[in-house]
Image (tube, rainbow, N blue to C red):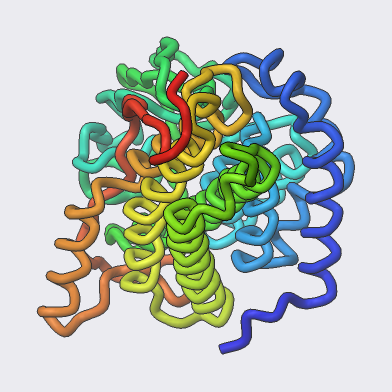
Amino acid sequence: MDFHPTEEQAAAAGLAAQIFGDLATHDRLAAAGTGSDAELWKALTTAGLTAAVEDVGLLGLVLLLEEQGRTTAQVPYAVTCVYGILALARHGSVEQRSRLLPALGSGEAIATGAFPDRGRITASADGRLSGSAPAVPWLREATHVLVPDTAGALWLVRTDAPGVRTSPVETTAPWSAGSLTLTGAEAERVGAGPGREAYADVLAVARTAFAGLQAGVCAGSLARAVEYTCTREQFGRPLSTNQGVMLRAADAYMDTEAIRVTAYEAAWRVDEGLPVGDHALTAAWWASEAGKRVVHAGQHLHGGMGADLDHPVHRHFLWGRQLDAYLGCGSELLAELGASLAAGTPAPGGPAPGPHPAGPHPAGPHPASTPAAAGAPEGEEQA
């Protein structure tokens, strides 16, 4: 396997880093509240970084999402790319791709996904959906929602269609989330055939992409912690000279690298058309479990400052905990991975786009979480 980015992937990641670094400032993020930053979203789409996902592949998208995570940039980039552009590029019909991909690439349309852990939405014979999803990220901004039914089929629903109702839901991270209720809503099928493999493929891609986003969130949190502990002095020397602080930061660094490398491997396998279900589960587990440890460490290493809700590091804490919850409980992911390994059959995650035969229906992302309390590291004053 080769994790070195192509020239195109590296150029896209560099451009993303510049745009996120220039526009995703603390003041602008605070002003955005739970909604998206319209100027930042326009800058990304105008630069072609949304449409480019079709060309740079999933590994390229993971690199781009790392840059978003470093700044916790308040835009529906991950959901539009995963549940819109990549889902349609891999499983949509020719007509769907030609009609929807240009709008998604330009930012005119915004997609998200209602992926519950258990089937809550049913489809009638004539393609009308009924049911609900309790917390869908960026639903209040979305024009389209990718919805799996109880049989694992994928459907695309317009949020302004008759029979579709959305209502605001506040989650840990300010992702403009909402609850989705469908009552005989019209929808169009994405992917052919009666099986669940298209759903499994989208789920594997989502797990990998959001693991990449978590790698960036953790890297940003750790960078802030390192900067703070190297400049904050106590008893005449920087906090970073204390062995306990150094060990905590080192553990956070190793956890961040584990999230990154497992996300890279899963993304590379998707781009190479290799089975990826178990690898996506592994990346999701690291992102959930290790990501939680890293953002806690980042906040703890800030001491009393980390308890300030207005401090930039607190955004990383909120995003890290939300991604932990969205990817799913670590023990559940580990149990699913263990069952797959024990059975000797890889977890579903299609090696190639398009209609495929049926496969098992894996657990999906979980929606909401509540931020946990964080204290100060030993040797640092409490707020």
Give the number of marks.
Answer: 0
In this picture, residue 64 sits left or right of residue 278: right
The residue shown at (33%, 18%) is 181
Height in image: 153 above or below 303? below
Which quarter of the figure has residue 77? top right
Q: Which part of the image, by quadrant, shows the N terminus?
A: bottom right
The outermost residue toward the front is 236
In this picture, residue 152 sits left or right of residue 341: right
Which quarter of the figure has residue 166? top left
Height in image: 232 above or below 240? above
In front of the other: 301 or 365: 301
In front of the other: 179 or 222: 222
Residue 109 percent coordinates (x, y): 68, 32
Residue 350 percent coordinates (x, y): 40, 71
The residue shown at (55%, 25%) is 305
Residue 363 percent coordinates (x, y): 23, 51
The outermost residue toward the bottom is 1
Residue 209 percent coordinates (x, y): 52, 56
- Residue 341 seen in this snapshot: yes
- Residue 146 seen in this snapshot: no
The residue shown at (30%, 39%) is 366
In this picture, residue 136 sits left or right of residue 56: left
The residue shown at (74%, 47%) is 50
Height in image: 230 above or below 91? above
Height in image: 42 above or below 220? above
